[in-house]
Amino acid sequence: MLITKIKGFLSFLFFWLIAISTYGQAYNFINYDIGDGLAHERIMDICEDKFGNLWLATAGGGLSKFNGIEFENITIKNGLPSNYVRSILCSMNGDIWAATASGISRYNGKDFTIYQVDSLNENGNSVNKIFESNDGTIWFADPQGGLGKIDTLGRMTIATMPEMIGADKVIDINEDEEGNLWIITAIQGLIKYNNGRFTEVLTNSDFKGYLLSMCIKGNKLWISSNKGLLSFDPKNLNYELVLKNTFIKSANVIDVDEFWTVSALGALKYDNGKIKHFSKNQGITDKGINIIFTDREGNVWFGAESEGLYKLTNEVFTFYGMEHGLETLPLTSVTQDSDGNYWYGSFGKGIQKYDGEKYVKFGLTDGLPSQYISSSAADSAGNLWFGSRGSGLIKFDGNSFSSLTTEDGLAHNFVRQVFVDSHQNIWIGTVSGLSKYDGESFENYNIQSGLAGNLIWGISESNEGEVLIVTREGISQYSDGQLSLIDIDKEVFDKRVNTAVKDNYGNYWIGYSGHGLLRIATNGTRMFVTTQEGLSSDLIYNLLIDSDNNLIVGSERGVDKVLLDEYGRVIRIKSYGQKEGFKGLGTTYNNIFRDNENNIWFGTDDGVFKYDASKEVKNEVEPITYISGLKLFYNEVDWSQYTDNISSWLNIPEKIKLPYSENNLILEYFGVSLSNPKEVKYKFRLLGLEARWSPVTERTEAVYTNLAPGSYTFEVKAANNDDVWSTIPATFQFEITPPFWQRLWFYVLLLVLFFVCFKLYNDYRVRVNLNKILTLERIRSEELQKVRKRMARDFHDNMGNQIASITVFANLINLKLKNKSKEVDDLLQNIQKHTSSLFTGTKDFIWSMDPDSDNLNEIFTYIRDFGEDLYERTPIAFFSNADDFDKHYPLPSGWSRQLVLIFKEAMTNALKHSQATEVHLDLKLSAKDFVITLWDNGVGFNIDEITKGMGMKNMNTRASQLNGEFVITNIEDKKGSKIYFKGIFNQAKLDKTIMT
């Protein structure tokens, strides 16, 4: 039995060794190791977080996070319990779980939470597998053999599996679509766990092998084993071996028709029934692979046992070189025969045939006339044609080689180009003219027969029967048996032309030696396409129209695809370099070929590249874009000083308010697209400052200086290498608070202050003007008082003397006329009477003119004296009463005369009409006003009648001029009448002077 197993294993090993040695091609693998920043070269597990970053579990270096550009390593120095990490999990809530040699850690981007399985035994904390179910529960392999669980609240429990052998341990955990847990143990095999119950499903003893790991795709469990890959049906509990007799460590099944597995000898790819083995010759390590992981964009990652991380970005380019059996280097031409074999011509080493498995070399000893091959082509009859340097045109009919030279009619033996048109004519471009061979004879063309030049640089066929011949002097076209020059301006050929083609839209494309591409449209318009527009180089060696009517450009620095629209105009340019799989430094002249399956081949000095456009799938997965950092005045900032809402993963505030003085910001952003991270492009804008998006840029930061106060939202979008833009931008909101002098309350305060200042200024101006007026008024009043005093004095002196003289003269006349008649005596009495009346009136006038009389004291005294004189010789008793005067009460000029006249009129009326026995004059004072009252105990009067009299009208008129309150009324029960006048001191001081 043991011998049988050993024989089987040796047969299997021999088979794979043969496969390894004969599998002759390399793919686009990129290797990352410690030189690129990786923590350790032994990678045990891989997962992808919510930002699109890869997390790598390493055996000795802790964790490595990779965003496609750079690595960030997390070790025990950061809080990880051990640098030996065996399994890693990127959970649904964004946490990173690691199963290490010293327990389980949960990392939230800022802090670690450590779970110790066995707190008493350090060796009992070594966990080798961790898994998350759909309900967020974390499951892990208990080091003692059980099944561990950490619920969403962080509580840890261990479930012991029944009938478990002591040394047995859980080695893998997964969950099906119905929520059942599936467990593989090292000894028992496959176990189902549901509702706390363990059920053995497929034991290793029944399987007669060892189950190693599993993944779930659709409704099947894909179980890796030492006997192959099992497709297990969890409902019917049966399985089918997909890969038989193959030791499969693990599988990564994304598509049931195309998936990857890890075998004992490296990586295997199952592709629709075909198995491809990948090892060193294919571009990946041959020292063992631990894990294969497919990211969200479809890139396949390989965690190696000792050579770090490998990435297979695509299978668009496949390389064949010396390590695969190709010997005839450097290559000068590629063609394909009718059986699908590829033929490679070289410079000095003959020809080599490749049938997909092995190479066969042809040289001089095999009848090849020359080992210096310049070009090649195949006709529909199965013949191969090779251009040589000195031996003319070489033909291979499937059995032997023969040559055609100038002796057979060839234009020259130094052949540069060989081309077979759709009519199966053989076109040979030489250093001295063009030959057409129909299988029997040659027809030669040169400058005299319509060629633009004799040195041929390119031959192609744009439409059936239209052959394009390129020289550095111009382009000719052969059609309908005629060769003619194409009408293109001579200045187009002032620069060195290397090649030219005509696309399916009728446009000419000319490739220059150092000046890029020139497109000449059907209407004659020209447009240059150079490195400024996106070409890899301006030194063009090869041009070819592919099956999708795009222009393929081979240059000294790689390959470009110029995507054309329906009119042959450039949509965009896609470049292929080392990251895209074209690892050669560049193409070589006239060394491009499209095979029967529309693959395009590029011969180089190091080998040949096959470009398979069918493998080129547009990357429709948009980058995951996020704000990665925030700087203030170009410096890192501890944002916890500003806010408590800090993102644990990005260490930036979720929303922040900044003072007006901190308004210079750098916003850093990143778009994760692992397919081609260096080709990610961005556009951004700052709402609140700008509405338009910025021009597309490769920069990962935006700088804003001297931002004005306000609310802002920064938005950024990213595009992957296929110009697929993120639909929802990453955003960051912040606010620049205004200084106090730009806030609303300050504007309100300014407005209030303005009105206060305006009011104060206006009041000040009013006061100034008023002071001026009062000063002028005071001066005028003083002058008026002086004038009044002078007038009173002068009037008294002059008028008084004159009146006194009249009186004296009247008395003298009366004395001297002793016998005067009664008439004369009456006249003299009238003179004395009027003179006395005039004297009294003059006295009143002079008194009122005197400014000393303009105070309440004088006025009351004057009225009182008048009353005493008036009622002295009458039956009416006169009484006066006044509050004590403790100071002078000045009144405006003119008030004294008006008040005196009012109360003299009132006293006179009381004497004539009141029939009173008493008349009283009272004065009441207060701080603001005064009241003068005249009342009697007479019969009163009829209010309606007296108001019609002239005397009463005069009193009312005089009182109104003083702006005072003047009232005439009867005392109750008709016991007399009362007249009072109320004046206000404040008004009296400020009112204008009442002119008499």
Image: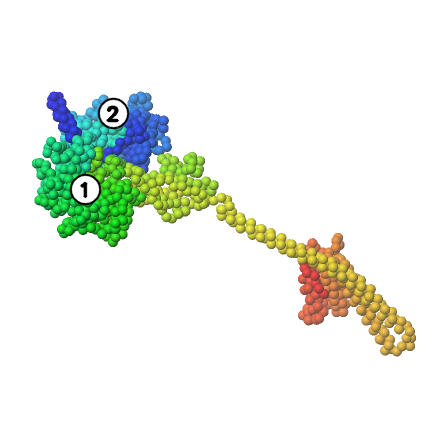
Q: Which mark is residue 145?
A: 2
Amino acid marked by disc 1: Val
Q: Position of residue 160 (x, y in %)?
A: 25, 26
Query: Considering depth in this image, is 966 or 430 the residue closer to the camera?
Result: 430
Q: Position of residue 740 (x, y in %)?
A: 50, 44
Q: Which residue is mark 1?
A: 431
Q: Is residue 474 above or below residue 844?
A: above
Q: Secondary structure at mark 2?
A: loop
Contact between marks 1 and 2 (CB within 8 A): the answer is: no
**Residue 698, image quadrant:** top left
Q: Residues within 10 Å of mark 1 (few under 14, many from 20)?
A: some
Q: Is residue 436 left or right of residue 497?
A: left
Q: Which mark is residue 831?
A: none
Q: Position of residue 722 (x, y in %)?
A: 27, 43
**Residue 96, image quadrant:** top left
User: Of label 1 and label 2, which has the lower sequence position?
Assistant: 2
Q: Residue at x 70, y 61 (%)?
A: 993
Amino acid marked by disc 2: Gly
Q: Residue at x 25, y 54 (%)?
A: 523
**Residue 991, image quadrant:** bottom right
